[in-house]
Amino acid sequence: MSQAALALFYLWSRSLVNLVLLRLRRLKQPKYLFGAVLALGYMYMVFINPHVMRAERAARRAAASGEAPAGPRDFSVFFSSAAALSLLLLFAILWLWPRKRSALTFSEAEIAWLFPGPVAHRTLVHYSLIRTQAALLFSAFFITLVTAGWTFIASPLWARFIGWWLLLSVFTLHVTASGFVITRLLNRGIAQWQRQLGVAGLVALLAWLLVAFDPNLRAPVRRDTASTELFMAYIQQQVGDGALYWVLLPLRALAAPLVAADVAGFLLALGPAVLVYALHYLWAVRSELQDREASLANAEKRAGIVAAMRKGNFNPGAAPKARRDPFVLSAQGTPVVAFLWKNLLSTREYLNWRTLVALALLMLAGNLLLDLPMVFTFLPTLLALILGAQTLFVGAQFARQDLRSDMDNADLMKTWPLQGWQIVLGEMLAPTLILTGILWLCLLQLGLGFNDPTEPRFPPQLRLAVGLSLALVLPFVCATQLLVANAAAVLFPAWMKSTVGQNQGLEVAGQRLLFVAAQWLVMMVALVPALILAVVVFIPASWLLGAFAAIPAAIVAALVLAGELAWGINWLGERFDAYDLSA
Amino acid sequence: MIDVSSFSKRYRDFSAVENLSFSVRAGEVLGLVGPNGAGKTTTLRSIAGIIPPNAGTIRIAGHDLRSDPIAAKRKLAFFPDEPRLFEYLTVRQHLAFIARLYGVANHEEMATVLLDEFEIADKIDKLPTELSRGMKQKLAIACGLLHAPTVLFFDEPLTGLDPLGIRRMKNSIIQRARDGAAIVLSSHLIGLLEEVCTHLLILKRGQRVAYGSLGEVTALFAQGESDLGLEEVFMRATGGSER
């Protein structure tokens, strides 16, 4: 090994050790220790405890019946085929997806010290590829933990860990190598669409060849989808024989160690899998070396992106573009609106009222005017349900165009002639509007999508009443969640800062969990008086209005929440005014 | 315009600034100077309303910063050493945003004058990422001056500027003072203070070491010597060390 390679190995290994030590040392701080305990507890309850309980239940049942517990069914063969097929699809998507120029990622310090240093470029490439191993090993460990309860594959945990690591490594290498190839194509003037067209043509040709010349391949018939077992048998028959078998062979070989039942089987499967890994590795190295100059330029750019991400900019790859004003901002009037205007400018261009109206019209047209088959209304409704639930539960953690993004400018904001509550309210407006807009759209689709004439439980009047009621309450629910999130930014700036950007680790995940839990706890407390008063109004009103009694009840709930919000914003404003930046 | 009386700031057991009093009148430029850790930034940020003081009174253009902060802040502008700009707002949008915060009715006319003065009128639709360091500094200053403040605070105003930018910044500070503004600037650059300031406040370990017009402060440490440079005054005042 050359001196340079040894130096790079030293850099990598010491950095890794120091990172681990740093993570351990920071557990002295209560915020990290608490986060770590919380995350570990969460992982145990979600991933490990269910398996332990299940095993105990099975053992008790077996003891009670006096028979040996029935072993789980083994779907290892199917699983390796499904994994290979999934990988093939992922690779196809990688090539078809619009992608930017890519390069090996180096830190600013690495660029400053390694690039001008006596280090061969090939060594740098090896270093860059190999150092991703720590993250891959951790990911493999985590996935092994999550999938430990998969009893449908017979492999022991250690084989699964190595199997997942191989799968993840090859996938990562494929992403890296394909990125280099795409970069080279772009540098040679081959545009995204040309490459996508070419790849799509190749995929279509391969599909045609398979269908035309492989008698084994056939479309599923009703019987194939009658049960899970029959469907799995159909898939296995399609990919386990004929041309598709050979197409999938390398990827199936890669997945084989993951499902190996014993040491002998594992060792037998390991050779071909390592070969696939090695070929991918060589491909990545060769692809990078073929366009070294562009790669170096991109590496520098990537360093800037990494630095931006560490500062909490989640979309640093895309340089911001000047946007037209979301609305005309006159110089007169409440300054609160200025924050809304500013923060809307920092969001995605498509997040505006025009998109909202266009989508609403599309939903109305699709559901009311067009006689679409069930699948076309069911899928959007299911999506609306999922998106709506996600927005409601964790939306406030993602819509951060508020104080959380502006706390770095807190000193400047404190020189503005504004009261704290004005700043807090102004900052909260943009994410409240965005989350409300998304939730209203989801509500609209849900209201329209549950239009099944054979289902008497959701008559139109009920859907209209519930929809309007929720539409009235949801903006205040979103604002309350955002108030909690913003309060965390002001009251616990160090905690909040440690959870943004690229700060990683179990303890940081625990802190994020804590924020979400606290947000919902406060939310629940805030909702109690609103719900009590809403029920008080609903019961007598329902005698007169039926389902539409939900609307006055919702108005009362909204008013209660608005009152709580007003108090909360004023209180947080006072905290912001008193917030000592130097402390 | 600026009246600071018995101002103190403590961080737990550490006293950053203690019992500091000074005033800056219209047309005066006060240079805040001292070794690292003397309390310059704490003082500047406190009188700009960023850091709450532990004791003392700070009045900006006649308004008490504690009891009437909004009125006081309407009269002041604070310029940090690094221009603070919003990544997603163009030059024009920055000015529109600030105009709304301060309610500047004729902001378009004001903005035109400032953009011309700072020679960034052709960058009106550019984002901060498309501007050089000097241009960003100019935009930050244009934003700060948009509401015609009468009290200006500068923290290391020459950081990152090229020689031309430095010359323009000095002229701009002098011109604002001639127009009647009261200015406080904190800097380690003795040359800048010598050229721009009318008054000097030397701090050391949170205490006032010297305060007065340039002539008065120089005389305090001259010990009969003539043509004593400000650098030497600074060395004598602070004992040539941070401790």
Image: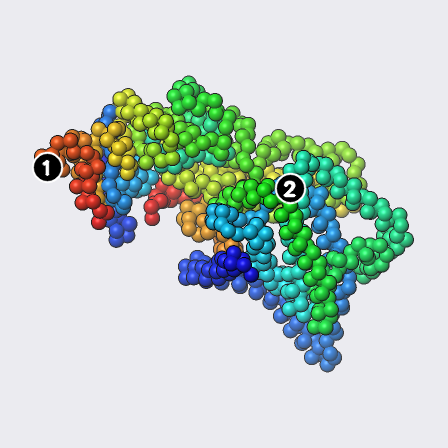
| Residue underneath mark 1 | B223
Which x, y percent locates residue A379? 73, 44
User: Pointer 1: residues within 10 angstroms few (<14), some, or many (20+)?
Assistant: few
Q: Would you place residue B83 above or below residue A12 in this image? A: above
**Parent chain of label 2:** A
User: Left or right: where does residue A92 sit relative to residue A316?
Assistant: right
Instruction: Name the residue at 71% across, 69% down.
Output: A266
Q: Is residue A501 visible?
A: no
- Residue occupying the far left of the picture: B224
Instruction: Name the residue at 67% across, 76% down.
Output: A60
Circle number at residue A183: 2
Position of the N terminus of chain A by quadrant = bottom right
User: Left or right: where does residue A37 sit relative to residue A50?
Assistant: left
**Which secondary structure, mark 1?**
loop
| Separation (CA) of disc 2 from disc 1 | 71 Å
In this view of the protein, which residue sits in the foreground, A107 or A559? A107
In this view of the protein, which residue sits in the foreground, B229 or B127? B229
Q: Where is residue A358, by image quadrant?
A: top right
User: Left or right: where does residue B205 sit relative to residue A580?
Assistant: left
CB within 8 Å, label 2 to label 1:
no
The amino acid sitting under disc 2 is Thr
Which x, y percent locates residue B107? 42, 22
